[in-house]
Image (tube, helix red, strand yellow):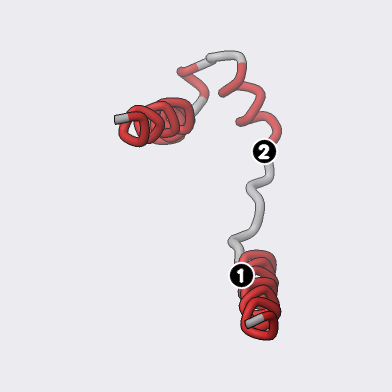
Amino acid sequence: MLTDRRFDRWLFAVLWLLLLAYALLFAPPVPADLLGQLRDLALARVQAVDPIAIAVFNLLGVLPVAFLAILAV
């Protein structure tokens, strides 16, 4: 029984390392003005930022609350 747990942990660790390597090696290049875009997004300068980026940024706060409400039921 103990060896099964060790194998599961090892397999889980390998899976995470493979996912991390995939994300680092195959990620698209960083845009030239990424920090400027993030600054504009944080300061709510909506005319300077893509509307889809604003929608995703707002959903990052809404979705966890929605999932928490589902789990609380």
Residue 43 drawn above or below residue 36: above
Task: Confirm whether residue 55 shows in the render.
Answer: no
Number of marks? 2
Q: Quadrant of the N terminus?
A: bottom right
* Towards the viewer: 3 or 28: 3
**Local secondary structure at mark 1:** helix
Q: Secondary structure at mark 2?
A: loop
The Cα–Cα distance between marks 2 and 1, rounded to whole angstroms, is: 27 Å
Q: Residue 14 placed where, x, y %?
A: 68, 77
- At 62% from the left edge and 65% from the top edge, which residue is drawn? 23
Residue 35 is situated, as x and y percent measured from the top left of the image, at: 70, 33
Front residue of this view, candidates 61 and 72:
72
Please indicate, yes or no, whether residue 39 appears anywhere in the rendered image.
yes
Task: Tell me the residue that label 2 is attached to.
Answer: 33
Earlier-in-chain disc, 2 versus 1: 1
Decide if residue 2 is on the left or right side of residue 69. right
- Where residue 32 appears, as percent x and y from the top left, is 68, 45
For badge 2, the amino acid type reads Asp
Which residue sits at x=36%, y=29%? 72
Query: Left of 33 or right of it: where is 56?
Result: left
Asked whether, in this view, residue 56 is left or right of residue 37, the answer is: left
Q: Amino acid at mark 1?
A: Leu
Q: Residue at point 64% right, 58% down? A: 29
**27 shown above or below 32:** below
Closer to the camera, 1 or 24? Answer: 1
Checking the image for residue 19, the label placed there is 1
Q: Which mark is residue 64?
A: none
Q: Which quadrant would the C terminus be assigned to in this image?
A: top left
Q: Position of residue 45 (x, y in %)?
A: 53, 15
